[in-house]
Image (cartoon, rainbow, N blue to C red):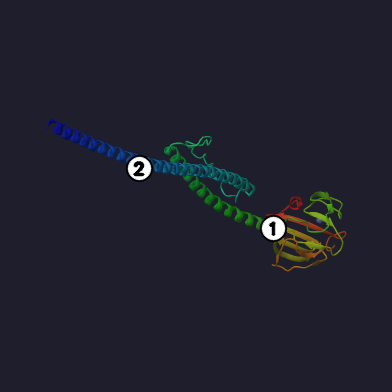
Amino acid sequence: MRFQWMVLSLLMLSGTASFLYINHYQAITASQSAEAQLSDQAIRLQQDLATKNSMIQQLQNEIIQLSRQAEEVRSKVEEMKTLEQELTQLLPPSQAPQPDKPVSAPAQTADREYSSLPVTAQQLELLTSSALASYTSVGQELDKLQAKWQQSKLTILLERERFKRIPNIWPTRSRVVTSPFGYRKDPFTNQSSFHRGIDIAGAMDDPVMATGTGTVVTVAFDPFHGHHVILEHADGLRTWYMHLNSVLVQLGEHVECGQSIGKLGTSGRSTGPHLHYEVVQHGKSTDPQPFLP
Ligand SMILES: [Zn+2]
């Protein structure tokens, strides 16, 4: 009887041990599987993180590049503004557009030195907003420059037109001045007299040209001036062409600078073929020399 009890007890004990062992084995297997799953997830997360870090790095580089470009563009605009101011100074003062007040240097940003990459989000944000502000301000400066250049172009065109209407060439092919402007001994009376123009030597019927664009205000003949023409130009200026052999223009006619208005001669009070050329400003004879090239 006792033996039977012992066998039964042994069987129960081994059954319990088997049960406990199986349970323990199952627990270990489940734990190992969970661990493997976690490990896989960790690897995937690390890969994601690496990709995102690489993207952030690329974006950082692009922001820095944009910021540098903004500074380069700004620097070019500053150069253009200097050039514009130099051009403005070449224009006549009365018509020159007023130069802008000097523009203060752009605000310094936290990361003007690019030797090291910005590392914090705050630094990147600052750099981005600075680049954006720079582009906006450059755009406004370009608009201003465009308006100014258009104004300068108009001024230059007007000035070129005005210049054409001011005597600025020789009235003859000949450059031989036989009698200058000012006091001289009169060839007829041999007494000192004031010569109101210059005498230019030439051959009979040499072309006589309008020295500036203008209007014919006088075509006449008298024993003193001979056949003569008077042109009216800009700035109260008139030019007189005397002792002509013949006249090629009519009263009121518009003439272009360089246009033939008559032929050289010796009509009137003259000792030989020449042109007496006179420049009169606001009714007063003036030295023609400054109006010759
Ligand atoms: Zn003369």
Identity of the residue drawn at 79% across and 61% down = 242
**Marks 1 and 2, the one that precedes in the sequence:** 2
Residue designated by label 2: 37
For label 2, the crowd category at 10 Å Cα-Cα, with few meaning under 14, some 14 to 19 and many 20 or more, is few
Q: Image height check: is 259 above or below 109? A: below
> In the rendering, at what x and y percent does residue 214 appear?
69, 62
Q: Image height check: is 2 above or below 288? A: above
Nearest the viewer among 175 and 55 is: 55
- Give ligand 1's quarter of the image: bottom right
Q: Where, by quadrant of the figure, is residue 221 drawn? A: bottom right
For the residues labelled 1 and 2, the Cα–Cα distance comes to 91 Å
Query: Is residue 225 visible to us here?
Result: no
- Kindly identify the amino acid type of the residue bearing the numbered disc 1: Lys
Query: Is residue 152 visible to us here?
Result: yes
> In the rendering, at what x and y percent does residue 53 appear?
45, 41
Nearest the viewer among 66 and 87 is: 66
- Secondary structure beneath label 2: helix
Identity of the residue drawn at 74% across and 66% down = 219
Question: Mark 1 against mark 2, which lies toward the viewer?
Answer: 2
Q: In this view, does 145 lie to the left or right of 171?
A: left
Q: Is mark 2 within 8 Å of ligand 1?
A: no
- Kindly identify the amino acid type of the residue bearing the numbered disc 2: Gln
Nearest the viewer among 37 and 44 is: 37
* The N terminus: image quadrant: top left
Task: Say the numbered circle drawn on residue 164.
Answer: 1
